[in-house]
Image (cartoon, helix red, strand yellow):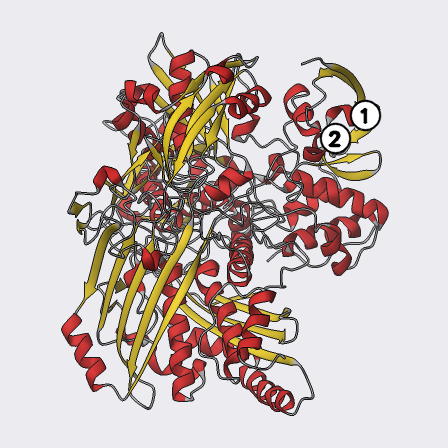
């Protein structure tokens, strides 16, 4: 099948590749760019394990062709840590609040939460729950994910999140 | 001592041992997208395999034409059953003593059954090839309703065994019958029912569902023709078992098989068994000489690799009129699908369902389970529970509520009246188990006080009156559940898998500088073993948990273990870890005695080292002793500091808990709201309370899903109608209730550290709590039992059936 040239910004760096027009964005990211932090859980847009940040929106990369992302500015979990290599407030929050278990939903969940906090830096619990409802987690029951996001919100806002994980 | 000398508290804290809310070491890589899952693996020249699957639930395969598929660019091979027959792998043994087709052999027996395996250069080309394989089917009549499986005129499903009168677990009564499993004293139980003042009887169904971990089942197989070695990376909850199974069926010497379970994205029982995808990927690698990857998609996962439950339990309880139970009689019709591929210990065709007497002192009980074949996917795995224990807990916990309703007694009061009393432990149940320890009354009363149970009942009574007066259309249910689990399979006297006793193992090796590695026969699928196993070792031998690397999942390096499922990791491997650590400590004590020039008996353990009794300054830390083990051991002693332990547990462990759910249901829409969910768990000694709480949250969420909607449903022709996340209920953060957790601690008396296991308790206890809440809400309208799952539609249907909706 004829291939198409695509070029995009990935975690701040220019990347390009030759892809079949039918190639899903998630496969381009995982297989051609070798950024395997973005996962595949359902292939039907339900689970959110493949969530990436694309031009300022949370996008499920299993439901978009790589060619549609030509020219886009994309961030994946690999681009979340602080420039000095330390964990970002969200990554730290997930660890401190026990917001993950098997880790499979975590990259998509963190990428989604990062966008959520940019749009709403001090979300209520209800807003967090609604805001991450496109991302499924089978392990945690979400409660500690909510706390992880609250932890990060507090930290970014210069406050200290009091409630510790049990 | 100077000011810099750490205090005892500081020394304790530095270890981050048992009881500490240690943050997980796994999370550093997982939060950065640096986990290493199977599908992340990319080997040079790697090919991709994909299945051609049957659209029919029951059909004869007339022909398979692979010509067009082989012409698709990128397609290298199409395997059918004829190819597998050449290597004697057309069928494979199941863990339950049955056999299962790897690829369709003459017929298909369930929708989406594997028919052919297309191997291509990439996953897109493999898909193209799948679309071009031409299969001609002749459809056959189906058996979907398990209650019709043994009708005289039911179609023969398993032609390969239709004349076999004897199955793996005794005589077969019908061509679609698999086994009958009988436990207990029938005569005594029948007599108890004849004499009973009150009896109840109800057919309680636990519907078919699926574990659906977020990562599906997958593998990469690579056969090295020169060395004759097969390496399999896969989503295996039990890697050593997979290695032995492959050695037995593929005739490759076991030392030439390397099985590696990298990070696994959740298991919940789905990843215990061996599936056709693993076999086909291995064969394809042998045929092509290239590594072959096989990754299930979600629909394949939900419709083929395992299912859970599908138990139909006719439950009878005999009691006195003041509410003392006198007998339990249960008959189970178990739908096993097309092949009996239950992942149970070999001698237990219905798992540990004979825990069905639950937490109650039944003087007698009788249980019979009939397993039948139907045109559904094989499996029967323990979806986040010990083997068939959720089914048993649901059966008895619904049964007790139904009895309470008949007696006009409060369900919590009925439970308190019948609990096994603390002084009865170790308790021998009527169906053959020896419960190790428990204090049920304390747990139940603590739960009732915590939720202000009496006030809830008063509120409910007032709401019922208001409903009757037409002032509200909302009904309120209080669901009580008190479960006893049986986990930690298990003692070699009664548990094996394919003849291998269900021990588990640990090897600890300490390095000269006071750090070390522990290799364990289990495999975390999210439970955080890398964190908690090190905590056990830290407490046992005084080396900080941060200085212990935990490694699992590589059969070349880990000692043989039976894997992680059935909440067995802590009860079995946790004990192996503690005993291996104690062997090390014993050797370290000899070295310390030599260095301190005293007798071993003159030493005492003090947090992180040995000191001479009465002489606190004469002290050797474990770190010092690690160095000494490689430098100055006593004459005649081998250098080094390492130990291996294979632990065969003397008994199972019996975690328990009291759960209470408060739910409101709008009868006109069936919409429910979980107002409150309180979960008290007693899992014995608590290794990491943070992780325990996380496990409980997750298990409760799965229980919520199962009870309130999650179902693998078939239509009358055998089509799966819930084959994607669109139809298969997966709760999001919005639907998921808030969880309140609590605990009591009753250590296991036979476990080296007193721990019992917790990961599965919330699924076991949670489902009956939700279902009892729904049933309790409707009870005053005249209903005795409403079948799960309790989604909005079914709630509305129930209300309509009870005449309260026009």
Question: Relative to B546, does residue B368 appear above or below in the rendering?
Answer: below
Circle 2 sits on which residue?
A79
Above-or-below relation of B472 to B746:
below
Dot 2 falls on a residue whose secondary structure is: helix
Q: Which corner quadrant of the image does residue B635 belong to?
A: top left
Residue at 36% from the left image edge and 10% from the top image edge: B225
The front one of A89 and B455 is: B455
Question: Where is residue B132 drawn, in percent x and y?
Answer: 52, 22
Q: Where residue B749 sits in the image (x, y, percent)? A: 31, 61
Q: Which residue is mark 1?
A: A12
Residue furthest toward the top? Answer: B226
B404 up-or-down from B44: above or below: below
Does residue A1 appear left or right of residue B81 in this picture? Answer: right
- Closer-to-camera residue (B683/B686): B683
Q: Position of residue B468 (x, y in %)?
A: 61, 90
Q: Position of residue B564 (x, y in %)?
A: 40, 43
* Circles 2 and 1 in contact, beta carbons < 8 Å: yes
Q: Residue furthest front?
A: B138
Give residue B371's quadrant in the image: bottom left
């Amino acid at each position: 099948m004829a291939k198409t040239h695509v070029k995009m910004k990935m975690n701040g760096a220019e990347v390009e590749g030759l892809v079949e027009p039918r190639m899903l964005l998630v496969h381009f990211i995982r297989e051609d760019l070798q950024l395997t932090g973005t996962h595949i859980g359902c292939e039907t847009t339900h689970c959110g394990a493949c969530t990436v940040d694309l031009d300022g929106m949370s996008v499920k990369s299993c439901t978009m062709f790589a060619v549609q992302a030509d020219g886009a500015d994309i961030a994946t979990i690999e681009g979340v840590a602080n420039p000095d290599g330390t964990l970002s407030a969200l990554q730290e929050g997930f660890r401190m609040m026990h917001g993950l278990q098997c880790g499979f939903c975590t990259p998509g969940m963190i990428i989604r939460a990062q966008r959520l906090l940019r749009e709403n830096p001090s979300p209520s619990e209800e807003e967090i729950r609604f805001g991450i409802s496109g991302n499924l987690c089978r392990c945690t029951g979400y409660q500690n994910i909510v706390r992880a996001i609250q932890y990060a919100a507090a930290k970014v806002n210069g406050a200290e999140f009091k409630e510790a994980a049990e | 001592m100077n000011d810099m000398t750490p205090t005892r508290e500081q020394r304790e804290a530095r270890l981050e041992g048992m009881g500490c809310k240690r943050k997980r070491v796994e999370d550093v890589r997982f939060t950065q997208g640096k986990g290493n899952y199977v599908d992340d693996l990319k080997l040079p020249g790697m090919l991709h395999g994909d299945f051609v699957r049957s659209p029919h639930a029951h059909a004869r395969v007339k022909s398979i034409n692979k010509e067009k598929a082989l012409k698709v660019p990128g397609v290298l091979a199409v395997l059918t059953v004829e190819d597998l027959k050449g290597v004697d792998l057309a069928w494979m043994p199941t863990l339950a003593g049955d056999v299962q087709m790897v690829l369709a052999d003459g017929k298909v027996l369930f929708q989406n059954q594997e028919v052919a395996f297309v191997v291509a250069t990439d996953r897109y080309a493999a898909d193209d090839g799948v679309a071009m394989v031409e299969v001609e089917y002749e459809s056959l009549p189906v058996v979907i309703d398990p209650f019709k499986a043994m009708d005289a005129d039911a179609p023969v499903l398993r032609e390969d065994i239709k004349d076999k009168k004897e199955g793996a677990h005794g005589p077969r009564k019908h061509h679609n019958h698999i086994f009958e499993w009988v436990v207990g004293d029938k005569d005594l139980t029948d007599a108890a029912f004849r004499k009973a003042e009150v009896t109840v009887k109800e057919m309680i169904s636990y519907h078919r569902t699926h574990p659906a971990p977020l990562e599906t089942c997958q593998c990469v197989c690579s056969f090295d023709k020169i060395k004759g070695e097969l390496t399999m990376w896969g989503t295996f909850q039990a890697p050593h078992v997979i290695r032995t199974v492959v050695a037995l069926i593929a005739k490759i010497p076991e030392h030439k098989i390397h099985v590696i379970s990298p990070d696994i994205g959740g298991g919940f029982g789905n990843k215990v068994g061996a599936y056709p995808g693993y076999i086909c990927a291995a064969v394809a690698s042998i045929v092509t000489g290239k590594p072959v990857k096989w990754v299930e998609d979600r629909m394949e996962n939900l419709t083929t690799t395992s299912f859970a439950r599908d138990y139909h339990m006719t439950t009878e309880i005999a009691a006195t009129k003041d509410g003392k139970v006198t007998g339990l009689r249960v008959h189970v019709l178990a739908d096993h699908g097309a092949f009996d591929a239950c992942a149970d210990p070999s001698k237990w065709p219905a798992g540990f369902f004979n825990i069905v007497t639950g937490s109650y002192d039944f003087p007698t009980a009788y249980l019979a389970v009939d397993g039948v074949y139907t045109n559904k996917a094989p499996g029967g795995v323990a979806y986040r529970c010990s083997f068939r224990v959720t089914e048993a807990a649901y059966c008895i916990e619904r049964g007790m509520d139904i009895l309470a309703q008949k007696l006009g007694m409060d369900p919590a009061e009925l439970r308190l009246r019948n609990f096994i009393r603390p002084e009865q432990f170790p308790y021998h149940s009527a169906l053959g188990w020896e419960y190790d320890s428990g204090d049920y009354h304390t747990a139940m009363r603590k739960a009732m006080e915590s939720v202000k149970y009496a006030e809830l009942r008063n509120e409910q009574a007032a709401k019922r009156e208001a409903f009757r007066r037409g002032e509200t259309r909302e009904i309120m249910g209080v669901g009580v559940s008190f479960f006893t689990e049986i986990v930690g399979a298990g003692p070699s006297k009664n548990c094996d898998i394919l003849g291998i006793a269900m021990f588990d193992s640990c090897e600890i090796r300490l390095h000269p500088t006071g750090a070390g590695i522990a290799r364990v026969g289990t495999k975390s699928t999210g439970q955080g073993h890398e964190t908690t196993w090190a905590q056990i070792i830290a407490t046992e031998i005084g080396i900080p948990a941060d200085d212990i690397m935990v490694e699992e999942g590589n059969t070349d390096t880990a000692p043989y273990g039976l894997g992680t499922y059935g909440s067995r990791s802590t009860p079995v491997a946790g004990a192996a870890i503690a005993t291996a650590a104690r062997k090390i400590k014993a050797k370290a004590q000899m070295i310390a005695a030599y260095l301190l020039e005293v007798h071993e008996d003159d030493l005492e353990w003090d947090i992180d080292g040995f000191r001479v009794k009465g002489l606190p300054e004469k002290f050797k830390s474990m770190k010092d002793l690690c160095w000494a083990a490689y430098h100055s051991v006593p004459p005649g002693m081998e250098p080094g500091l390492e130990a291996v332990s294979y632990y065969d547990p003397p008994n199972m462990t019996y975690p328990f808990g009291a759960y209470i759910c408060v739910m409101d249901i709008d009868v006109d829409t069936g919409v429910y709201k979980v107002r409150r969910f309180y979960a008290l768990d007693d899992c014995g000694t608590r290794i990491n309370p943070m992780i325990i709480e996380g496990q409980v949250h997750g298990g409760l969420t799965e229980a919520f899903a199962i009870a309130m909607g999650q179902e693998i449903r078939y239509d009358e022709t055998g089509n799966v109608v819930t084959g994607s996340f669109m139809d298969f209920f997966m709760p999001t953060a919005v639907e998921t209730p808030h969880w309140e957790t609590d605990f009591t601690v009753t250590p296991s008396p036979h476990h080296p550290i007193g721990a019992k296991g917790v990961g599965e308790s919330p699924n076991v206890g949670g489902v009956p709590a939700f279902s009892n809440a729904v049933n309790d809400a409707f009870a005053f309208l005249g209903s005795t039992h409403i079948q799960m799952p309790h989604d909005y539609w079914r709630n509305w249907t129930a209300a309509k059936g009870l005449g309260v909706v026009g």
